[in-house]
């Protein structure tokens, strides 16, 4: 298994000036990214062993994509990472930037937006801040997070009034509003049309560069994985069958020849797994 | 013209949501009145021509006169107030019990297993069949009416609240748990609003049953209220007062439904089905 040293891309100053507004202060803090360490992680449901000894280290601030055929255990692995399920063997730990063991304040974006239809967009984002936070402060932070996903002007709308892509951006804002150290994306673009998907990819890449959280993306779209991630992990039969780093700098064009080749390599690895 | 009106009010709504839409006498306000007004006109015509006997069915004019004389004596107002008070008390007691049971059984598996079967059994007994027993227990006082109305109201509210809670989107519940919601906020932010459309269905069913139960129990044993007024009038062959009581039931029923509908539109404005 390859373990390569990844250099953090420099955090870009907030370059996007398309809004014509100044960036709200409350959003300018970056995250405390966590690193993930998995040792021999196993998960079984009754007799069915889904994960068979996963060893994996993910550095703080890295963008890792996990790909594989359906049923390969990628969603199970993801549910273990955010604590939705408990692993049946092995060990999962999280460390902060100084190597101290840390609590994983993981946030997750699902394939469906899962917004509360009876809350307006701003209140939905504020759900991401958790309990016991001052109302005005919650609203300020929520609006700042909406600004990041270019939906500041939709703050008072109902979710039912938004398009599918906009709803998914609200879900992203909700996940990011608490500045999590780890963001887990469970096929977040699976339900979107091709064009919306491309603009969402750009958006995800940008917020990741700006905020510096650790990102784990589960997807079955190899091209998406290659486009976004520093490192792609292929899961097959509950094991890691390929660990490939994507060295290209992070302003990747769709249709790049080198990326296309990596994509071919990955597809081969996935399909070979039988 | 009506179409132009409609487009105008729509653009108005889109450009500025703060402007309240004033009710105007459009097609939507006139159409629902067409059938009742025609029926009343035919009825009056039948009575005036002698086609409908006064002994069987008094004319609308006679009913209106009965209304004036009853209202002038103060009996009518008193009887309406008494009946409405009983109805509300029954709705409050039965509705609260049904709502709480529905929530608890929807949330807690243990409580559901413990009580749901019993509730379903009791539910199948027509509650009006309990009248003889209730008279033996409570006599013919207020308790008997409160008991019957509450019992009648309880089950539609229980069933629909329970159903609503059980059908709250699992994905949203999971989301709430991942985002660290406490049990109370999970209830307040996810479960209750999710169940609300269903609870309103229960409430509207309950309103119908509330009037029915009340009228029956007032006809059997009471010394005031609309049911008593109608039953008393029957003994003196005052058909106009009997029909007046029926008309008032219809109006009160409609009023209750309008209030429930308003409440629904107001609390469920997020739901596309209730957006105007």
Image (cartoon, coloured by chain):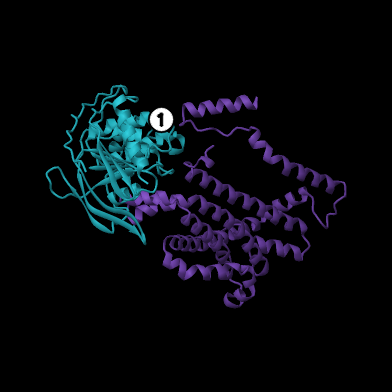
Residue A165, given in percent of the width and then of the height, sits at 41, 33
Determine the residue positioned at 20% across, 35% down.
A29
Residue A48, given in percent of the width and then of the height, sits at 37, 58
Closest to the observer, A161 or B174: B174
Pick the quarter of the image with the C terminus of chain B.
top right
Closest to the observer, B130 or B238: B130
Closest to the observer, B261 or A116: A116
Residue A1, given in percent of the width and then of the height, sits at 21, 43
Label 1: state its secondary structure: helix
Image position of B203 (left or right of B233): left
Q: Which residue lies furthest to the bottom in this view?
A: B136
Residue B194, given in percent of the width and then of the height, sits at 45, 50
Determine the residue positioned at 29% across, 54% down.
A52
Image position of A110 (left or right of A63): right
Tell me if residue B129 comes above or below residue A42 in the rendering.
below
Closest to the observer, A69 or B117: A69
Q: Mark 1 lies on which chain?
A: A
Q: Name the residue that disc number 1 marks.
A: A196
Q: Is residue B42 visible?
A: yes
Q: Which chain is purple?
A: B
Colour for chain A in the figure: cyan
Determine the residue positioned at 52% across, 71% down.
B118
Q: Which residue lies furthest to the right in this view?
A: B50
Determine the residue positioned at 64% across, 68% down.
B128
């Amino acid at each position: 298994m390859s373990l390569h040293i990844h250099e953090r891309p420099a955090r870009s100053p907030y370059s996007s000036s398309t809004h014509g507004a100044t960036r709200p202060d409350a959003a300018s803090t970056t995250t405390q990214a966590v690193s993930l360490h998995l040792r021999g992680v196993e998960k079984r449901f009754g007799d069915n062993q889904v994960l068979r000894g996963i060893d994996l280290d993910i550095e703080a601030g890295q963008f890792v994509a996990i790909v594989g055929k359906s049923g390969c255990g990628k969603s199970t692995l993801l549910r273990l990472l955010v604590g939705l399920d408990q692993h049946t063997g092995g060990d999962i730990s999280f460390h902060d930037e100084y190597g101290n063991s840390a609590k994983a304040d993981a946030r997750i974006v699902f394939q469906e937006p899962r917004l509360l239809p009876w809350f307006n967009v701003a209140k939905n984002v504020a759900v991401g801040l958790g309990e016991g936070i001052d109302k005005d402060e919650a609203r300020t932070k929520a609006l700042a997070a909406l600004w990041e996903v270019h939906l500041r002007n939709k703050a008072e709308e109902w979710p039912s009034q938004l398009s599918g892509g906009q709803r998914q951006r609200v879900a992203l804002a909700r996940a990011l509003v608490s500045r999590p150290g780890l963001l887990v994306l469970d096929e977040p673009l699976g339900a979107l049309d091709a064009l919306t998907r491309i603009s969402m990819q750009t958006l995800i890449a940008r917020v990741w560069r700006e905020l510096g959280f650790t990102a784990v993306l589960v997807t079955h779209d190899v091209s998406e994985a290659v486009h976004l991630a520093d490192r792609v992990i292929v899961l097959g039969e509950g094991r890691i069958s390929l660990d490939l780093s994507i060295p290209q700098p992070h302003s990747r064009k769709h249709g790049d020849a080198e990326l296309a080749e990596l994509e071919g390599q990955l597809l081969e690895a996935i399909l070979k797994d039988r | 013209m009506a179409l132009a009106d409609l487009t105008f009010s729509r653009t108005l709504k889109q450009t500025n949501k703060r402007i309240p839409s004033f009710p105007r006498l459009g097609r939507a306000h006139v159409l629902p009145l067409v059938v009742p007004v025609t029926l009343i006109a035919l009825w009056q015509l039948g009575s005036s021509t002698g086609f409908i006997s006064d002994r069987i069915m008094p004319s609308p004019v006679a009913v209106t006169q009965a209304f004036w004389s009853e209202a002038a004596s103060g009996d009518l107002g008193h009887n309406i107030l008494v009946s409405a008070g009983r109805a509300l008390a029954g709705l409050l007691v039965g509705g609260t019990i049904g709502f709480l049971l529905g929530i608890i059984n929807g949330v807690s598996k243990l409580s559901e297993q413990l009580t749901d079967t019993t509730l379903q059994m009791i539910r199948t007994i027509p509650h009006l069949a309990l009248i003889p027993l209730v008279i033996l227990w409570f006599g013919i006082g207020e308790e008997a009416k409160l008991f019957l109305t509450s019992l009648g109201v309880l089950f539609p509210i229980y069933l629909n609240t329970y159903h609503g809670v059980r059908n709250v989107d699992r994905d949203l519940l999971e989301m709430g748990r991942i985002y660290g919601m406490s049990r109370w906020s999970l209830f307040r932010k996810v479960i209750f609003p999710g169940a609300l459309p269903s609870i309103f269905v229960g409430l509207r069913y309950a309103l119908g049953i509330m009037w029915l139960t009340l009228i029956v129990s007032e006809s059997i044993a009471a010394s005031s209220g609309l049911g008593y007024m109608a039953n008393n009038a029957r003994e003196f062959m005052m058909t106009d007062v009997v029909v007046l009581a029926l008309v008032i039931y219809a109006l009160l029923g409609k009023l209750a439904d309008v209030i429930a509908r308003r409440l629904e539109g107001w609390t469920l404005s997020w739901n596309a089905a209730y957006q105007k």
